[in-house]
Amino acid sequence: MEPKIILRPETRLVLTPMIQQALKILQMPTLELANMVNQELAENPMLEEGDNGELDSLASKPEIRDTSVGSKGERTQEVDLDENHTKTTEVEQDRWNEYFWNSEEYEIPRYGREKRTEYMEPQVAKQSTLEEHLLWQFRLVCKNEKEFRIGELIIGNLDERGFFPLALEEIAQAAGCDADAVADALEIVQSLEPVGVGARNVEESLLIQLRYLSNRNELAETIVEKHFLALERHHIDAIARAEKISRDQVIAAAKVIAALDPYPGRHSFAGNIQYVIPDVIVEKHDDQYIIFINDDQLPELRLSHTYRKLMRKGADVGEDTKKFLSDKLQRATWLMKSIDQRRKTLYRVVETILDVQMDFFEKGIEFLKPLTLREIAERVELHESTISRVTSQKYIQTPRGLYEFKYFFSSQIKTADGVGVSSTSVKAALNEVIAQENPQRPLSDQKLTELLGQQGFNIARRTVAKYREESNILPASQRKHFE
């Protein structure tokens, strides 16, 4: 064998950096895109932020003119700023058309430009995390720096529920002490607020909380310590026989236990609140739905007059400077074009969703239709992956509430008469049935299947169990309330 150089022709689809940037912009939610645009404004001298009265965007600047009409009536645009400006190549333009919808002009209302938003982003003070809250308390009660170091290691290893999942020996090895010192520090952590953190499991967490109640209930502690599994399964009579007490006494103790939080760290400190700003707003006016692209967070862009004049000077500008400005100009115009195309594609996708799901907007969740990315892709004549990027991590505000785009996409379930309905509608019907059940006699999955069948939903019991779990609803044995 010997090394050889062999020429072999092959066809490959290569994405240019600009196409990659356009796809990335397509996928970005509004706030993330606004951050990227602001960063580009700071780095690209060819870009400036303009006011509404003096816009120089792709749609309004005089240097960009209509040159041709596409196959479906779309006017394409060409940048003509300087003969030395590097124009988009034909190959690159062809690839652009392969990835993005290319159709007639659409009048796309802008919610933030012509109509001011009716909401303001709330200003919220930073919320302390569970770790910060516990460390602050531990600092006040610990005896010395060594004990604080041990407590710091314990608190730093608590999971999202507030539980301590490690062995004492692991902390002892890390802190350079014995296991008894770790056990003492863990006992202090378990006494901090919220009470119950630092426990190894749910039973220990409940026991800690019961022992710190102002009126201790020894029966409740005994039930958690000895009959926790029976309590989970609501075997009240079995616990009463084992402890030789009345059923009413067990129920009274069980109500005390039910009032406790089995995961004290999960709910008390959930981290900073995140606010969602919709990317698209759908409003109803005079029996018609109007789609607004909510780009109020995006700065208006224009090309710099100063640097364009500098490029026109020709001989007065060095070759390196001309090349630098030419590259920045190409990047600026492509960014503006990508943002404009994102708006058009987003508008077209929402328009199609609105057309398909009109019954939902008019009548409610029960009338949500099954819908897939492929169906939308076929309607707007784009690739399915492009639709996936458009709908990723984006939200739409409607007269019925704020929804993530993926809410409108669901699989199909056949009804008894053969009509396809959305799985989301089935989940809504399931939640409604469970909400109306008798708390003392909750419905089993089999009974839920029968009741949904009476409503025309022909689904299996295992599907009902799956939808119940996806809705975070406990099984019937754990939904039963104490009488």
Image (cartoon, rainbow, N blue to C red):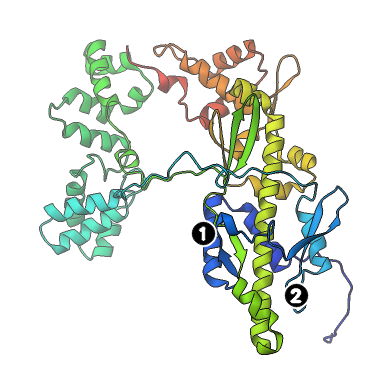
142 left or right, relative to 98: left
Q: Is residue 345 above or below residue 307?
A: above
Q: Residue at x 62, y 71 (%)?
A: 305
404 left or right, relative to 245: right
Q: Which residue is mark 1?
A: 35
Q: Is residue 388 above or below residue 420?
A: below
- Residue lying farthest to the front in this orientation: 53
Quarter holding the N terminus is bottom right
Helix, strand or loop at label 2? It is: loop
- Residue type (three-letter) at the residue carrying disc 1: Asn
Separation of residues labelled 2 and 1 (CA atoms): 27 Å
Q: Residue at x 16, y 56 (%)?
A: 139
Mark 2 Cα-neighbour bin, 10 Å: few <14, some 14–19, many ≥20: few
Which of the 4 quarters of the picture holds residue 107?
top right
- Residue type (three-letter) at the residue carrying disc 2: Thr
Helix, strand or loop at label 1? It is: helix
The mark tally for this picture is 2
Residue nearest the observer in this picture, 440 or 421: 421
314 left or right, relative to 224: right
Q: Name which of mark 2 and mark 1 comes first in the sequence.
A: 1
Quarter holding the C terminus is top left
Mark 2–mark 1 contact, CB under 8 Å?
no
x%, y% of residue 37?
A: 56, 61
199 left or right, relative to 24: left
x%, y% of residue 434?
A: 49, 17
Residue nearest the observer in this picture, 152 or 310: 310
- Residue lying farthest to the left in this orientation: 143
Q: Is residue 143 visible?
A: yes
Residue nearest the observer in this picture, 307 or 202: 307
Query: What mark, if any, has residue 86 been given in the picture?
Result: 2
